[in-house]
């Protein structure tokens, strides 16, 4: 499975200032790295200064442009990072205009901090940038005070700031930041040790509900997204790839296609040379005056494919192999190893158990299915490449390689994406459009024609049939309960396409006898990758459902059963493994969200619900965040489901930057989890995807969403972290556990629509 490595930043930063034309000032950032933040893995790198980056422009009229450096895919970071800067700079939000940065080494590669990038994934944006962005704003505020003190010849201690204005308390003299910009630009940035950050109780912007800066453009249909990119003279491309993964085009009727109306170019694209990684797939490109003309010509395309060996693979074959592997699952070696873990003597514990519980759980491949399909625009001209990209992980290397140039000869504009969820971590669209743009430019040069931009737009069918899918999972559980109903042994065999067991999902710190074994399904040649909450997406369903199953078999309250596990670590060990946050998993924080959601939901009176209605609970620790859900579900005799209400308790640290976006991320995560549960499934037949559009892959509709998803944030004394990942994984098991409470039917496979369920 492709995964993303969390990145880190530190607290030590200062800013450098230079003049802009027109009386403005440009504020850049330097940063070192000496503090572990919530996503840190391993030792902190040594402090290293970075080159300046542009964050703030001060205009003479006392308005401000603040740059958001990271990609925006709907998670709200375009608001959040500038909000942090603006609050510490002591502005009013109404004075601020936000701009997205282009891809620039000063925000990443040249920063001198290992792993620092312009990046959207893994809920890393807040933990990576929270303190550095505070330091940018706070240092700018300190410099404004110095500028005013020198202008008025008064002590800095007599000055205050607010709403972009410096005030001399004794004389009530005031000056706007804009009027001080010229003087400000001459001030040497102070050492960070001399800069005072605000007390969080004095925040005026952070912690408030701030509407998205792009909201008006979105709801009024203004061109804003990558799909709206429209540079002058642009042509439109479609790209036909083999329906079987790894297949190659060996011929096509491109000469016939070129004769169709509006078609400017058509050619077979050879696969990337061996050793180029990431490369591009073989296919046939059609380039036309409009996308519809290109797409219509595609209907007449006839391609001869070498489908290759993957054509013999299928989902049914993967499941059959998983069951066969489970029947002869090896015991893990002492001490575990990659894909294995062992504590105590599981087999001996099974022999002495009062009760044995066994269950098989599965979940399928999933497509990310963002509403805006993959697309990118590129212009190759005079040996240079310019790209407009919606990528979550923008990078110049692979597109430059596809265009046959060096990365230094490429530029990339970061354009808002209509959803990502991990799909845009993988940049095939940037690579493909760069290759196509270069081939188009070469043909046009030979014909004496000027080069033009080319937009590549995938269809929904392209998108779903050529995804980097959320891996499927096949889990085979066995657990032992003692005479008191306590968990005394736990075993899981995982049939995997990746061979890596997400060990932080297991209760090994609370079980005296524990083992996990995995084995690879092979061959398995379907591309897989990170989907929202990689490592816990899907796995949370099987783990939280099986723990619920154990609680029922032990005749215990399922929520209290989880708390009891957290209250009884074995030998002082914490559950999970390092890597989920600073200090690893924290049992007290886990208990905090479970206890909070218990109290919010009136859990103790759940037995008083009407017949056919039940409450279920699930908890997840993911990407340093702690999320617990209780949901109430009504199940009709016809298996129609209605989620009546959801309660959620969330611990993502000491500060919520934008409460509006935070609540939306929780609610959106839960509703997306409903789609995973009910209908989302990608199956493979003859090496190709069966489901090609939303008619076969239906998302949860607005009329199916719960009338209420109540969100409570627990502020704890830990660094702030992200929220997009941890809000999704516990949603499906919470619903499934509620279905069991309502009906006595245990759900062990997703999706559930093939079992006859539907939303009411």
Image (cartoon, rainbow, N blue to C red):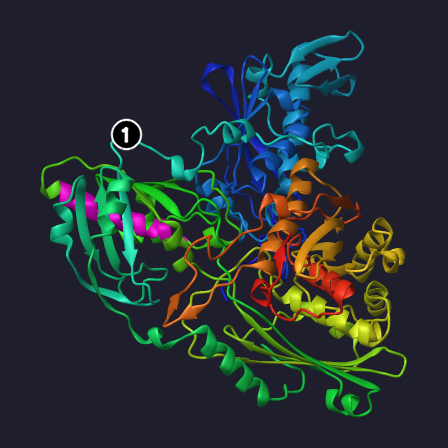
- In magenta stretch: residue 433: yes
Percent coordinates x, y for residue 28 in the rendering? 54, 33
When asked about the image quadrant of residue 583, the answer is bottom right
Q: Tell me, yes or no, if residue 397 can be seen here.
A: no
Image height of 190 relative to 341, above or below: above
Q: Nearer the viewer, residue 77 or 541?
A: 541
Q: Is residue 225 visible?
A: yes
Residue that mark 1 sits on: 232
Q: Is residue 370 above or below residue 56?
A: below
Task: Choose top left, top right, bottom left or bottom right for residue 152.
Answer: top right
Instruction: Identify which residue, 189 or 667, lies in the foreground.
Output: 667
Give the SS element for disc 1. loop
* Residue extending furthest toward the left: 447
Name which quarter of the figure residue 715 lies in. top right
Prevalent SS, magenta region: helix
647 left or right, relative to 369: right
Left or right: residue 69 versus residue 35 is: left
The residue carrying pointer 1 sits among few (fewer than 14), some (14 to 19) or many (20 or more) residues within 10 Å by Cα, namely few
**Vertical placement of residue 36 versus 291, above or below:** below
Residue 415, percent from left and from top = 44, 38
Q: Position of residue 262 (x, y in %)?
A: 18, 39
Magenta segment, which residues?
427-444
Identify the residue at image location x=74%, y=60%.
619
Q: Residue at x 46, y 53 (%)?
A: 695
- Residue at position x 67%, y 46% from top? 667
Question: 133 or 278, which lies in front?
Answer: 278
Q: Could you say where residue 209 lies in the image, as x and y percent from the top left?
A: 69, 32
**145 in relation to 512, above or below:** above
Is 597 within the magenta? no
């Amino acid at each position: 499975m492709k995964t993303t490595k969390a990145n880190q930043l530190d607290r030590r930063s200062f800013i450098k200032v230079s003049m802009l034309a027109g009386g403005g000032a440009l504020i850049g950032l330097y940063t070192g790295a000496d503090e572990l933040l919530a996503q840190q893995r391993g030792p902190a790198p040594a402090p290293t200064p970075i080159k300046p980056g542009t964050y703030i422009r001060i205009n003479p009229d006392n308005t401000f442009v603040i740059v958001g450096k990271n990609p925006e895919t709907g998670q709200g970071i375009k608001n959040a990072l500038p909000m942090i800067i603006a609050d510490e700079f002591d502005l009013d939000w109404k004075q601020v205009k936000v701009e997205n940065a282009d891809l620039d080494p000063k925000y990443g590669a040249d920063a001198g901090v290992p792993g620092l990038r312009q990046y959207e994934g893994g809920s890393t944006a807040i933990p990576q940038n929270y303190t550095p962005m505070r330091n940018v704003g706070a240092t700018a505020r300190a410099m404004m005070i110095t500028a005013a003190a020198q202008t008025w010849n008064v002590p800095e201690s007599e000055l205050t700031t607010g709403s972009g204005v410096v005030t001399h308390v004794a004389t009530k003299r005031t000056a706007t930041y804009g009027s001080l910009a010229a003087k400000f630009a001459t001030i040497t940035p102070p050492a960070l040790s001399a800069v005072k950050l605000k007390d969080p109780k004095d925040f005026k912007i952070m912690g408030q509900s701030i509407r998205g800066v792009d909201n008006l453009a979105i709801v009024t249909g203004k061109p804003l997204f990558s799909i709206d990119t429209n540079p002058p003279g642009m042509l439109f491309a479609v790209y036909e790839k083999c329906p079987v993964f790894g297949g190659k085009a060996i011929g096509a009727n491109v000469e016939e296609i070129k004769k169709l109306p509006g078609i400017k170019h058509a050619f077979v694209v050879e696969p990337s040379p061996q050793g180029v990684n990431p490369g591009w797939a073989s296919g046939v490109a059609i380039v036309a005056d409009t996308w519809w003309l290109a797409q219509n010509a595609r209907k007449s395309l006839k391609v001869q494919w070498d489908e290759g060996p993957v054509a013999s693979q299928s989902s049914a074959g993967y499941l059959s192999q998983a069951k066969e592997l489970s029947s002869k699952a090896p015991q893990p070696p002492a001490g575990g190893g990659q894909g294995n873990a062992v504590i105590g003597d599981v087999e001996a514990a099974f022999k002495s158990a009062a009760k044995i519980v066994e269950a098989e759980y599965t979940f399928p491949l999933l497509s990310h299915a963002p509403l805006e399909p993959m697309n990118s625009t590129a212009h190759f001209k005079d040996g240079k490449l310019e790209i407009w990209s919606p990528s979550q992980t923008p990078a110049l290397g692979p597109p430059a390689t596809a265009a046959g140039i060096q990365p230094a000869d490429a530029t990339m504009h970061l354009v808002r994406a209509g959803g990502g969820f991990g799909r845009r971590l993988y940049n095939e669209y940037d690579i493909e459009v760069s290759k196509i743009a270069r081939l188009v430019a070469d043909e046009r040069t030979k014909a004496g024609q000027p080069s033009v931009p080319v937009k590549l737009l995938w269809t929904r069918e392209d998108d779903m049939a050529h995804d980097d899918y959320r891996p499927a999972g096949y889990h085979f559980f066995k657990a032992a309960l003692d005479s008191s109903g306590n968990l005394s042994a736990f075993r899981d065999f995982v049939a995997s396409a990746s061979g890596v067991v997400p060990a932080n999902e297991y209760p090994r710190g609370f079980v005296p006898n524990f083992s996990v074994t995995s084995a690879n399904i092979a061959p398995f040649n379907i591309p897989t990758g990170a989907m929202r909450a990689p490592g816990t997406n899907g796995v949370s369903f099987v783990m939280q459902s099986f723990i619920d199953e154990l609680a029922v078999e032990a005749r215990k309250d399922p929520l209290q059963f989880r708390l009891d596990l957290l209250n009884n670590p074995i030998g002082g060990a914490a559950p999970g493994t390092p890597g989920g946050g600073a200090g690893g998993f924290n049992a007290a924080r886990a208990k905090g969200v479970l206890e909070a959601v218990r109290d919010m939901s009136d859990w103790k009176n759940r037995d008083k619900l009407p017949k056919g209605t039940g409450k279920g609970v699930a908890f997840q620790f993911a990407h340093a965040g702690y999320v617990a859900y209780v949901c109430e579900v009504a199940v009709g005799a016809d298996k129609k489901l209605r989620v009546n209400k959801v309660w959620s308790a969330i611990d993502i640290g000491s500060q919520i930057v934008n409460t509006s976006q935070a609540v939306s991320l929780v609610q959106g995560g839960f509703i997306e989890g409903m789609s995973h549960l009910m209908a989302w499934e990608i199956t493979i037949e003859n090496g190709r995807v069966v489901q090609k559009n939303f008619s076969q892959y239906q998302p949860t509709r607005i009329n199916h969403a719960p009338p209420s998803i109540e969100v409570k944030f627990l502020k704890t004394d830990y660094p702030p972290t992200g929220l997009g990942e941890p809000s999704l994984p516990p949603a499906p098991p919470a619903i499934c556990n509620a279905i069991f409470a309502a009906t006595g039917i245990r759900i062990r496979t997703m999706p559930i629509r093939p079992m006859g369920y539907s939303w009411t």
